[in-house]
């Protein structure tokens, strides 16, 4: 390890700094090798594949340049797919944020038994995603539990998963109830971080509950709202299991979101080249949103501890 | 907002919360009760909130129709390995990025963070090709290797780094003066302090692995190898119609163990995830 023999005044090779550097590289090596192997190389490959006409069944693999991107722009399904993704993401983020905020405000009240309510509202987060989705699929059948309950009060419910508008609403609602607990506890933590003196001062000035909420609470927790909404949007772009179990993208293409379309093209129709082109599109959308998130974080960082 | 509430207000709030609870609690209740109803009763009208008749043979049928015990084991052992593996890899990397000065550490950290920009859905086609060339299709390797080393672990590394950054430097100084090596310091001083962060990493990593659906259906093809989410969707009759009560029995068995752990440790779950979510 050391080169001590030659000159006694010469410092040993393994100084603290060098030992630290070596330890640092050893510590990060597994993660770095993993990221290169399972993220960066595949990202390069997916771009390379996207320049090829590649049908796995026909075992064709021909360089076609930008032809897949041309095809993407002319894909008659693409507007419907992007529309479904946009409706799903927008519906999810709006409903999710509103419900999470409502639940957090309710749980923030001085009442007994709030831990029980918090636990129950949070519980779907830990229920297996596919199990949760299957139960809802069962409930949303034409003769299922929801229409059963509705008919008790004299309403004839639609065939939720087979009607275009209600299918999309169903997929959004199932996903919101599954994961709204996460945003709820984030909002709850933010609400509890608002300094109490602000409310006292507002009360002295005669501001009512609603005014306090609008003028103090909302501005103080706005960074959390902003960040969670972007995280929720990015997460919503990855939705797959819910679509596969509930609607298989139907009826028609009304619930075929981008990831589901990608899966169909690549693994059901075996168009790996075009599937890769769709992957690049997904990557660009996710990257743009994540980049926006980082920029926003930088600007509002003074609100965070 | 935190003034004392009038009794009427309290009743109104409790009432509102109970109504809001319905879509969160009713599905789980319906799943469990329907799983023990005979098939003729599960679409009964009006719906039975408590089964009229019990039929526990659904649970036996789950195991007859599919190698469900094997599939359960697949999901459990994969999730366990992924959880432990991610805790090791991400705590080491997070510690190094936070506490050790070495050349290019910031640049390398940026490269690792790219994993957050690239969800595994984007790279699913090349990952399929890579594992095909390694002869690992229809094995569990893709479901183990990618989460531990690939994009899903980056968030865990980020969480661990944020935690280690917050530790005061003095904690390590004394040990450094005593000539303790980096690994010793990491293992005996830093890691024991990181239990809350590690707990949060363990929880979300386990849930992520337990819920994986796209990856198993892409990589696995034989029922012996299936994981639970995949297996749950396979309980169909010859015409592709769902065998609801059997499917719900399987779903119940998938959901209940994790729910029980959650109820026991709900504080750690909620606060751990809230904490990491805020920082992430």
Image (tube, grey):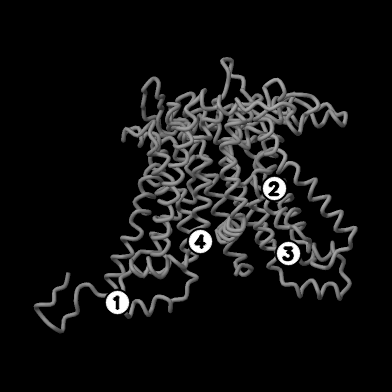
Q: Residue furthest bottom?
A: A9
Residue A163 appears at what percent x and percent y? 72, 26
Q: Residue furthest top?
A: B238
Q: For the residue labelled by badge 3, is the local secondary structure a helix, a strand or a loop?
A: helix
Q: Residue under mark 4: which chain is it in?
A: B
Which residue is disc 3 drawn over? A219
Q: For the residue labelled by badge 1, is the local secondary structure a helix, a strand or a loop?
A: loop
Tell me the number on the disc at residue A136: none
Left of B89 or right of it: where is A7?
A: left
Residue B12 showing in the rendered view = yes
Viewer-closest of A10 and B171: B171
Which residue is disc 1 drawn over? B179
Viewer-closest of B53 and A294: B53
Which residue is disc 4 drawn over? B197
Q: Which of pointers 3 and 2 lies earlier in the amino acid sequence?
A: 2
Q: For the residue labelled by badge 4, is the local secondary structure a helix, a strand or a loop?
A: helix
Tell me how far mark 1 sits from mark 2, CA to CA: 52 Å
In the depicted structure, whether residue B203 falls above or below residue B230: below
Q: Which of pointers 1 and 4 lies earlier in the amino acid sequence?
A: 1
């Amino acid at each position: 390890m050391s080169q001590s023999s030659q000159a006694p005044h010469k410092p040993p090779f393994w100084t603290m700094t060098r030992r630290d550097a070596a330890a640092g590289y050893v510590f990060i090596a597994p993660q770095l090798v993993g990221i290169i192997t399972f993220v960066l190389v595949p990202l390069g490959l997916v771009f390379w594949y996207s320049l090829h006409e590649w049908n796995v069944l026909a075992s064709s693999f021909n360089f076609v340049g930008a032809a897949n991107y041309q095809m993407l722009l002319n894909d008659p399904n693409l507007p419907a797919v992007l529309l479904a993704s946009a409706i799903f993401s927008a519906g999810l983020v709006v409903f999710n944020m509103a419900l999470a905020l409502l639940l957090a405000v309710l749980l923030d009240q001085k009442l007994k038994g709030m831990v029980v309510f918090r636990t129950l509202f949070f519980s779907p987060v830990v229920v297996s995603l596919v199990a949760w989705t299957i139960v809802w699929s069962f409930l949303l059948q034409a003769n299922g539990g929801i229409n059963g309950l509705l008919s008790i009060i004299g309403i004839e419910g639609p065939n939720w998963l087979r009607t275009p508008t209600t299918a999309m609403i169903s997929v959004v609602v199932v996903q919101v109830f599954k994961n709204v607990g996460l945003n709820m506890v984030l909002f709850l933590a933010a609400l509890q971080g608002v300094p109490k003196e602000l409310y006292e001062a507002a009360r002295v000035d005669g501001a009512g509950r609603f005014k306090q909420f609008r003028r103090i609470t909302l501005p103080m927790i706005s960074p959390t709202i902003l960040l969670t909404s972007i995280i929720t949007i990015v997460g919503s772009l990855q939705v797959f299991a819910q679509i596969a179990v509930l609607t298989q993208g139907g009826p028609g293409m009304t619930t075929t979101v981008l990831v589901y379309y990608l899966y169909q093209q690549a693994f059901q129709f075996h168009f790996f080249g075009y599937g890769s082109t769709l992957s690049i599109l997904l990557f660009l959308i996710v990257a743009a949103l994540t980049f926006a998130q980082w920029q926003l974080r930088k600007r509002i960082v003074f609100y965070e501890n | 907002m935190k003034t004392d509430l009038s009794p009427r207000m309290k009743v109104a709030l409790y009432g509102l919360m109970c109504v809001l609870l319905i879509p969160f609690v009713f599905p789980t209740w319906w799943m469990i009760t329907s799983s023990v109803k005979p098939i003729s009763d599960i679409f009964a009208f009006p719906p039975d909130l408590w089964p009229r008749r019990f039929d526990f043979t659904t649970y036996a049928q789950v195991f007859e129709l599919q190698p469900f015990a094997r599939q359960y084991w697949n999901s459990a052992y994969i999730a366990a390995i992924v959880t432990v593996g991610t805790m090791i890899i991400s705590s080491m990397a997070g510690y190094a990025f936070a506490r050790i000065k070495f050349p290019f550490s910031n640049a390398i950290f940026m490269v690792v963070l790219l994993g957050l920009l690239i969800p595994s859905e984007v790279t699913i086609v090349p990952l399929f090709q890579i594992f095909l060339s390694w002869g690992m299709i229809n094995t569990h390797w893709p479901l183990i290797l990618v989460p531990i080393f690939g994009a899903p672990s980056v968030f865990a590394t980020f969480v661990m780094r944020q935690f280690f950054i917050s530790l005061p430097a003095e904690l390590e100084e004394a040990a450094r003066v005593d000539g303790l090596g980096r690994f010793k310091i990491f293992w005996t001083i830093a890691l024991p302090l990181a239990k809350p962060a590690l707990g949060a990493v363990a929880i979300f990593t386990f849930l992520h692995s337990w819920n994986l659906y796209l990856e198993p259906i892409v990589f696995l093809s034989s029922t012996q190898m299936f994981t639970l989410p995949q297996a749950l969707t396979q309980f169909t009759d010859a015409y592709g119609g769902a065998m609801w009560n059997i499917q719900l029995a399987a779903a119940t068995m998938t959901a209940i163990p994790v729910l029980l752990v959650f109820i026991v440790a709900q504080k750690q779950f909620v606060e751990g995830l809230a904490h990491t979510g805020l920082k992430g």
